[in-house]
Image: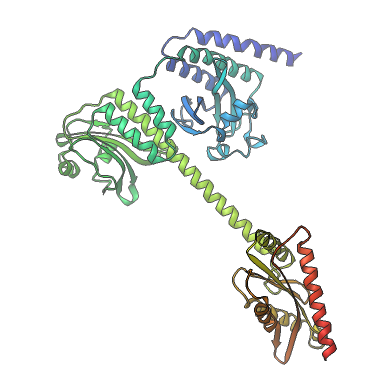
Amino acid sequence: MRAHEDITASMAAGPALAELLRTAVGSVGQRIDRALTVLVEQLGMEVAYVSEFRAGERVVTHSVSRSGGPVLPVGTTHPVEETLCHLVATGDLPVLVGDAAADPVMGGHPHTLAFGVAAHAGVPLAVEGRVRGALCCAATTPARTLNPRDEATLNAVAGYLTGVLTEHVGQPAEPGLRRLAAAVAAGRDLQSLTRPLLQLLQDITGLESTFLTMVDTSADELVVAYAHNSGDLVVAEGSTSSWQESLCRRALEEGRAEVTDVPATWPGAATAQQTGITSFVSVPVRDAHDELLGTLCGASSSTTPVGEQNLAIMKTFAQLLSAQLARETAHHLQAARATVIEQRMNSLREAAERDSLTGLCNRAGINRWLHKALDGIAVGGQRLAVAFIDLDRFKSVNDTYGHATGDEVLRRLAASLARTGRAGDLHGRLGGDEFIVAALLPAEASVDGWTARVRAAAVAVVDDVQVGGSVGVVSYESAGPATSVEYVLDQADRAMYREKHAMARTT
């Protein structure tokens, strides 16, 4: 009975919330932000956002964060199919995921790992009957109390937003907004995002120069990463200066985002004196931990007021650039993590495929090398040569001199064989006193010379003990379905025994 009451209450909560939202007034953006704020509060999440699918890109069009929570800047883009929004739109992700680590789809998703998503809720957004994006919420801690009432709330807000967005369809965007959307959609790296933003910022503010700096406060260094210049005042890309002496540092520490008379405000600023800067604006570019990464700036040689509205636009641009830097950092971290994992796997494979006594490849390593070699000759242009070496009368060495001497004989033989051929050739111990040497030779090369070098190396000397080996060689210019690793080893083994028997008849 209790479960039925909860479901009934959930079904009632959605329409009531939708009706409440519809009483709100304001611009489209204000109404959407208000609905997202309600969603964050109702679901107990940290961020709620609306995304739109545009030409293969997922673009965040509206975003609201809880105070102190993670920020997902408007304009953030990713390829659609790489996003959780895509999984929401296709129905491959549950509407409510209270613990991302426990969900088989979300647990291993790159964005879950890169952005620390621990809980997620999302539903598709359809405008004029077509899925155009998604409404999503996320948190960096699990939300295991998500329930049917929360799903009803999410669907109610989605329905409300669909109505708001449908009203907005067909309304022409302002030229600046169209250019901003185009810049964000095309910005696949920091440079391709920054350059159009700097030009748009110059058009909006009327400043002669707009530029992005990167800052290393510990090294007292400020570098102009990208700049857009349209007047007599030129800020050169790649130029470096002291962070302590910079106008950016003064503006940040004094809380002056805009200064229209730099010589009077900062009479001792050498940068202003050298470049002739009169008007200057600067907003910080920070990472998710509020660490300073750089500054987004504009300057003119004349008095050029910018105003609060344009400063707000600059701050939005700074958030876009910060998000792009975060994406690139996450990509590099993933690449570095993948490299570490690959190195670790190679190390484990190396340890698993090495003979502990001789250091040569063991049977597993021999099999893997030969499998790869057979694939290589199947393509053509190479010849595979395989030598099977078996020590003669090795048992008598163990019986007469002891196993310590026998082990040293095996090590000496392994070292001798390893000196033959080139890096990348196979030198392995099958077990006991049986060894394998193999190489991929040019198709026109003679196997006889290579065989002679292997025969010469198939000898071990320990004090007065000298032991030689019988060598059987086979070669292949092509590999068919029947040419398996087992077949090759068997044929080489047979060739070795033929030589051993031939030597026995002559002695």
Q: Is residue 108 left or right of residue 33?
A: right
Q: Quadrant of residue 358?
A: bottom right
Q: Position of residue 291 (x, y in %)?
A: 40, 41
Q: Nearer the viewer, residue 428 or 421?
A: 421
Rendered-image quadrant of the N terminus: top right
Q: Is residue 357 left or right of residue 333?
A: right
Q: Residue at x 60, y 73 (%)?
A: 422
Q: Is residue 102 left or right of residue 181?
A: right
Which residue extends farthest front? 444
Image position of 261 with respect to 438: above or below: above
Q: Position of residue 481 (x, y in %)?
A: 76, 57
Q: Is residue 335 left or right of residue 495?
A: left
Q: Position of residue 92 (x, y in %)?
A: 65, 29
Q: Position of residue 278 (x, y in %)?
A: 17, 34
Q: Residue at x 20, y 28 (%)?
A: 304
Image position of 325 with respect to 168: above or below: below
